[in-house]
Image: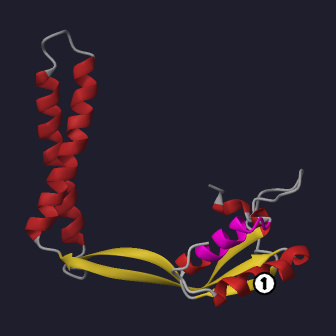
């Protein structure tokens, strides 16, 4: 996996790794990321130099999907659960450094303390919103379209290969 902050991953020695716009000529445009991946996979299967290909998401948008309503019960239950996990972890760590046979005490103290702190932090956080955000959600960054770019010396070959892919039905094996 490449680092998103180093641009294309093709930096020259002595240059800083700063975010850079993608380079290359468009050889295909797709409405979903899955279609763009399928196109690059086809290029790879056709012995195309895919190390010179970039998939670029264009027209980015943040999509927030509402997953449910928040109530005091859900907030406190979630806070207690996350606090319990953290407290259990801390208690187990402390239990490893106690004399043999007495590890249960630190685990139970850690678990109880974690639950209490989890409840307090969840309650304070939820109360501070004063009812302005009584729902839970998940955010995702998506693109309106995905362009496949190739370096100029291979762009024509890439367009030809992707045109053959476009003429093929999606379920046809390679």
Quarter of the image where one finds residue 129: bottom left
Q: Is 90 drawn above or below residue 7 in the view shown?
A: above
Is 38 covered by the magenta stretch?
A: yes
Q: Nearer the viewer, residue 163 or 125?
A: 163
Is 14 positioned to the left or the right of 134 in the image? right
Locate residue 120, reporting x and y percent: 16, 54
Circle 1: element type: helix
Q: Is 80 drawn above or below residue 96 in the view shown?
A: below
- Taking the spot 75% from the left edge, 65% from the top edge, the residue there is 50
Residue that label 1 marks = 159
Quarter of the image where one finds residue 108: top left
Magenta residues (range): 37-48
* Residue extending farthest front: 173
Is 17 positioned to the left or the right of 99 in the image? right
* Residue extending farthest top: 100
Locate residue 132, reporting x and y percent: 24, 82
Q: Nearer the viewer, residue 104 or 46?
A: 46
Instruction: Answer few, some or many: residues within 10 Å of disc 1's Cα (few below 14, many 20 plus, some between 14 and 19).
Output: some
Is 46 covered by the magenta stretch?
A: yes
Q: Nearer the viewer, residue 142 or 70?
A: 142
Locate residue 157, reporting x and y percent: 84, 78
- Taking the spot 70% from the left edge, 79% from the top edge, the residue there is 148
- Taking the spot 71% from the left edge, 82% from the top edge, the residue there is 162
Locate residue 134, reporting x and y percent: 20, 79
């Amino acid at each position: 996996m490449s680092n998103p902050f180093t641009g294309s991953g093709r930096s020259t020695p002595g240059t800083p790794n700063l975010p850079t716009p993608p380079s290359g000529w468009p050889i295909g445009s797709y409405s979903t990321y899955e279609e763009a991946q399928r196109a690059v996979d086809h290029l790879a299967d056709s012995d195309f130099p895919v190390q010179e290909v970039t998939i670029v998401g264009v027209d980015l948008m943040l999509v927030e999907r509402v997953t449910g309503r928040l109530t005091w019960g859900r907030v406190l239950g979630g806070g207690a659960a996350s606090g319990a996990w953290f407290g259990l972890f801390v208690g187990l760590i402390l239990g490893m450094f106690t004399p043999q046979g007495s590890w249960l005490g630190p685990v139970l103290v850690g678990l109880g303390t974690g639950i209490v702190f989890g409840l307090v932090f969840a309650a304070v956080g939820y109360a501070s919103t004063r009812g302005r955000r009584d729902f839970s959600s998940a955010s995702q960054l998506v693109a309106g379209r995905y362009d496949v770019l190739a370096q100029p010396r291979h762009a024509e070959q890439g367009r030809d290969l992707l045109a053959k892919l476009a003429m093929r039905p999606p379920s046809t094996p390679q």
